[in-house]
Image (cartoon, grey):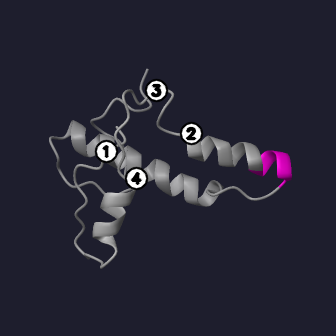
Amino acid sequence: MNRILNWEFSDERPEDDEIHQTHSEEVPNVYGHGHAPYLANVIRAILDDQPGLVEAHEGRKNVEILTALYESAATGGMPVTPGCAIRHSRLGRG
């Protein structure tokens, strides 16, 4: 869950290799290990009444990207545009 396996974009950038190497991590189990630095920042932001690393507008973008990833996986890897309607994955369905 925390290891980046594929980092490919239609518009490659010079920093892509560094991002792939520095932001991919191996954890024994994602539950309880994957978000510690982010959650520590949330706590500091609340206690110090400061903005967090990610505010609502940027957070929504992340949710749209993750939702598109799930939708793509559910369709066998078909390209999906973030923010599109969910048709095949089980996200949001009871």
* Residue nearest the observer in this picture, 9 or 15: 15
* Residue nearest the observer in this picture, 47 or 61: 47
Q: Is residue 94 above or below residue 28?
A: above
Under mark 2, the amino acid is Ala
> Which of the image's four quarters has the C terminus?
top left
On the image, the x and y values in percent for residue 7 come to: 25, 59
Residue depicted at x 41% and y 26%? 93
* Residue nearest the observer in this picture, 18 or 6: 18
> Which of the image's four quarters has the N terminus?
top left
**Numbered tag placed on residue 65 in the rendering:** 4
Helix, strand or loop status at disc 1: loop
Helix, strand or loop status at disc 2: helix
Looking at the image, tell me whether mark 4 or mark 1 is earlier in sequence order.
1
Residue 75 figure quarter: top left
Residue depicted at x 33% and y 67%? 18
Reading the image, the residue beneath label 1 is 3
